[in-house]
Amino acid sequence: MSQQEQWSSKIGFILAAAGSAIGLGAIWKFPYIAGENGGGAFFITFIAFTILLGLPLLLAEFSIGRTAQNNAVDSYRTIAKGTKWHYVGILGMVTSFILLSFYSVVGGWIVIYLLKTVTGGMSGLSSAQYGEVFGQTISNPLLSISVQFLFILITILVVSRGVQKGIEKASRIMMPALFVLFLILVVRSLTLEGAGEGIVFLLQPDFSKITSQTVLEAMGQSFFTLSVGVSVMVTYSSYLPKNQSLPKAASSIVGINILIVLLAGLAIFPAVFSFGLEPGSGPVLLFNVLPTVFSQMPLGMGFFAAFLLLFLFAALTSAFSMLEIIVSALSKGNERLRQKYAWIIGLSIFITGIPSALSFGVLGDVTLWDKTIFDLADYAVSNILMPTGALLISIFVPLKMKKSDLYEELKRGSTLKKAVFNVWYSLIRYVAPILIIAVMIDVITG
Ligand code: PHE
């Protein structure tokens, strides 16, 4: 598929970009990071970063991609000829590589749960037993590596076939369905006995819990859930026709994401408190809590299986975008090379990710700075590499793109007011770089 080939329908791009954004970040990662960082105060900080930095950066990546109409690396080359700015794209490729290496581990967990649920292995257990079953499952080396492989294999197969055919079609049904199922889940969770405590935990900020580390994690989380800072959105918007409104696409993606984060929080925390579980129990949180909530519903395991299937889909559409950015930059529109690189890169990511998969079992004791290999990879991506990429993008846009050209690009197909544009421009030019640097310095010196 060539770089210039465009999304087949108007809504295709929004679906794919939203598909990249909505994934494990909002559904799996947000609840456990919020749980570890005191709940409400983290939630508010996360929302503030999402609106002040995430949304403007998303729009910045869209402007780069649609202006240059090229892959993540060559887009920077097209706009800033003869400079080293294309390293921002290369940084994005490296970040996506590491990201998919541990993302696929969690993707594999969804696969295991799905298989267990449809074969009846999840019925009638107590909440403690669910935790036990899950712990045993993910510490089994062969099993966790096999499902991780399966997750990557699906990603390779879709990406090697090209962006439109692969990604667009299914999103139309799966995403709205996921949303509806989430609503049902939230209703169940909110009506559990003792649910109120979970709502207070999520929505009532206690700012004494905020440390510089919490602020960094909230910032990293806002980039992570929106897929910004790695030039994935540069890549996706390069396939976009010129007559579509970028501001509208960006704001709807941010809106949907905040909604999903809120739904995930409202589904998880009431249940955590109602069942007396630990909000700070880390990456396993969602997987320990959800089966218990579902088991308290009529037809619970049926709903759970449906939920897992849609959740798997959401994780896959994010995974596609991670592999897509690397493969499209390497294959430069050559169909045969696309296939070859999808396999080479995909399999390399799988091999790189094996130690992360084993972090919950045989390699569980291997730690550095108190973090397992899985945690380290996640930390490096979310709190170092993505913020660095975001910082560079916020410097690149005002430095290398003319303000009037940016206005033209963002105004295409939209009714963007000059005043709103100016707010966006100031956020990108001043607020984003200053804030990102301040947060990083605060953590280093704190
Ligand atoms: N936004 C995705 C999620 O929340 C993760 C992601 C990050 C995808 C960066 C692509 C690039 O799951």
Image (cartoon, grey):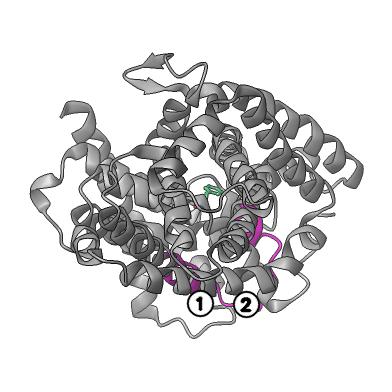
Q: Amino acid at mark 1?
A: Lys
Crowdedness near tag 1: few (<14), some (14–19) or many (≥20) residues, C-alpha within 10 Å: some
The tag on residue 248 is: 1
Is label 2 in a helix, a strand or a loop? loop
The tag on residue 84 is: none
Q: Are marks 1 and 2 in contact (CB under 8 Å)?
A: yes
Say left or right for 435 vs 80.
left
Residue appearing at x 52%, y 59% in the figure? 22
Residue with the most extreme front position: 124
Say left or right for 182 vs 33.
right
Say left or right for 445 vs 280.
left
Magenta-tinted stretch: 234-257
Residue with the most extreme left position: 208
Where is residue 344 shown, x and y percent of the image? 79, 30
Q: Nearer the viewer, residue 325 or 36?
A: 36
Residue appearing at x 75%, y 37% in the figure? 330
CB of mark 1 near ligand 1 (< 8 Å): no
